């Protein structure tokens, strides 16, 4: 059965975020990260560290754009009106709110990874992609059947 990539990219997960004793919810797209996006983020981090003359606001606009791609929704309001999820809004978010969103997403991703690891341990799997990659990088062919390289 074929898998439509849009079905994966459009998956959304709601997580609670906390700031100053207040809780709000954020929807994010867990599968939106790609190798290209990771490379863009790494490139931006290098530019921000190495190029003091670069336009800092433009760099932050790029980061905010990627952030907007990840965020699918939130229940943040100002004056009772919902805040748009766009670059200008993200640039103007107070740092504690931005950090609370990042912490909520990061915490959820970490718990997902821990659940996967625990599942592999209890399923009796003896081979992991990370282990197979480490073996391959050391010049030793992996002995596990290809079907276990999930």
Image (cartoon, rainbow, N blue to C red):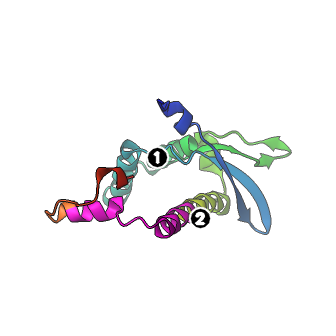
Q: Determine contact: label 2, label 1, CB under 8 Å.
A: no
Q: Position of residue 40 (x, y in %)?
A: 37, 46
Q: Position of residue 105 (x, y in %)?
A: 59, 57
Left/right placement of residue 38 relative to residue 1 reads left
**98, 102: nearer the viewer:** 102
**118, 101: nearer the viewer:** 118
According to the picture, the residue beneath numbered tag 1 turns out to be: 33
Whether residue 121 appears in magenta in the rendering, the answer is yes
**11, 85: nearer the viewer:** 11
Find the residue positioned furthest to the right: 80
| Of the image marks 2 and 1, the number of the one nearer the N terminus | 1
Identity of the residue drawn at 33% across and 62% down: 130
Question: Which class describes the residues within 10 Å of circle 1: few (<14), some (14-19), or many (20+)?
Answer: few
Residue 70, quarter of picture: top right
Identify the magenta region: 111-135
Whether residue 12 appears in magenta in the rendering, the answer is no
Q: Is residue 63 visible?
A: yes
SS label for mark 1: loop
Which mark is drawn over residue 123?
Answer: none
Identity of the residue drawn at 57% across and 65% down: 111
Q: Is residue 2 above or below residue 144?
A: above
Identity of the residue drawn at 19% across and 61% down: 137
Which mark is drawn over residue 107?
Answer: 2
Q: Position of residue 87 (x, y in %)?
A: 58, 41
Q: Position of residue 59 (x, y in %)?
A: 44, 48
Q: Is residue 37 above or below residue 105?
A: above
The secondary structure that most of the magenta stretch takes on is helix
Q: Is residue 53 visible?
A: no
């Amino acid at each position: 059965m074929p898998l439509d990539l849009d079905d994966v990219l459009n998956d959304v997960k709601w997580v609670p975020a906390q700031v100053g004793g207040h809780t709000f919810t954020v929807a994010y797209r867990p599968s939106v990260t790609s190798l290209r996006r990771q490379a863009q983020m790494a490139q931006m981090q290098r530019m921000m560290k190495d190029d003091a003359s670069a336009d800092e606001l433009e760099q932050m606009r790029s980061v905010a754009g990627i952030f907007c791609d990840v965020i699918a929704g939130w229940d943040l309001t100002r004056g009772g009106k919902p805040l748009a999820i766009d670059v200008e809004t993200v640039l103007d978010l107070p740092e504690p709110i931005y950090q609370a969103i990042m912490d909520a997403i990061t915490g959820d991703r970490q718990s997902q990874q821990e659940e996967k690891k625990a599942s592999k341990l209890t399923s009796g799997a003896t081979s992991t992609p990370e282990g197979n990659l480490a073996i391959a990088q050391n010049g030793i062919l992996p002995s596990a059947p290809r079907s276990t390289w999930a």
